[in-house]
Image (cartoon, grey):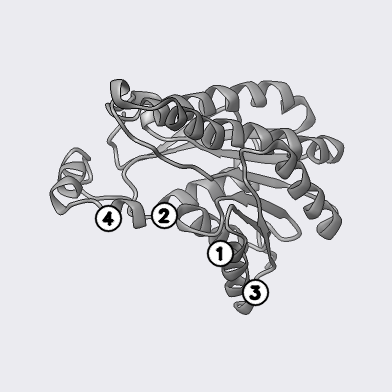
Amino acid sequence: MAKTLENRVALVTGGARGIGKAICERLASEGAAVVMVDIMPDVAEQSAAEFRSRGYDAMAVGANVASLQEAEDTVKAVMEKYGRLDILVNCAGITKDNLLLRMSENDWDAVIAVNLKGSYNFIKAASRPMMKARYGKIVNISSVVGRAGNAGQINYSASKAGVIGMTKSVAKELGSRNIFANAVAPGYIETDMTRALPEEARKAFADAIPLKRAGQPEDVANVVYFLCSPMSDYVTGQVINVCGGFLM
């Protein structure tokens, strides 16, 4: 039986670690060739080599998503190797949390540059081959704080809210070319970053969730897979929360 993403090529920014790596795992398990983009080339290559050792088709690219030129160069390298780009998942992101009055301009600019402009850069670069092929699936990783806000995270919240607005605009602009654009908004997901939080803070987060537990990277990856698969061929411009009911 053919896998649902066989002969598809997926580019995942932030794909070498955490949630991005889980997304690559899910897409590769369904037959897609995965391009793992990370700002640290050695980390990307290590993850890609691990995937290849397990029989997956994986390519590593070191790139700073905040650079449009590097986004364009990445897409060019993918096209040279595979001749196509079917799926784009914008997962790369950073946090530089602080209260408004203490937040530096540099911390604001850095988060907007990676989380919001980074997604724009790769959508702009990937849309050209997708438009030519008259097919594409774009999934942008937002956050529940992009919908609800969060004290101490105005830069992150603004960047993730911007991702949602951009997703809807892309869906409207490119829908006639059979290009789909959706967003996924994770809540409290267990990653290296959240595992480093004090136990008290982790418990407080879990207590605020109806399911009373953190999510796993695979929970996000499963929803991303749905949006990249033929099962979502009448779904575009949507935002799906993956938060255990935290945001309703």
Q: Is residue 92 left or right of residue 56?
A: left
Q: Secondary structure at mark 1?
A: helix
Badge 1, how many Cα within 10 Å: few under 14, some, many 20+?
Answer: some
Whether residue 66 sits left or right of residue 108 in the image: it is right
Label number found at residue 196 = 4
- The label on residue 52 is 3
Query: Disc number at residue 217?
Result: 2
Which of pointers 3 and 4 indicates the residue nearer the eye?
4
Image location of residue 169, percent across then percent down: 63, 21
- Label 3, residues with CA under 10 Å away: few <14, some 14-19, many ≥20: few
Which residue is more in the foreground, 179 or 3?
179
Q: Residues within 10 Å of mark 2 (few under 14, many from 20)?
A: some
Q: Which of the two residues, 82 or 103, is positioned nearer the viewer here?
A: 103
Q: Are marks 3 and 2 in contact (CB under 8 Å)?
A: no
Which mark identifies residue 183? none
- Mark 2 element type: helix
Q: Position of residue 209 (x, y in %)?
A: 22, 40
Q: Can you tell which of label 1 and label 2 is closer to the viewer?
A: 1
Quarter of the figure with residue 41: bottom right
Q: Residue at x 76, y 42 (%)?
A: 72
Q: CA separation, marks 1 and 4?
A: 20 Å
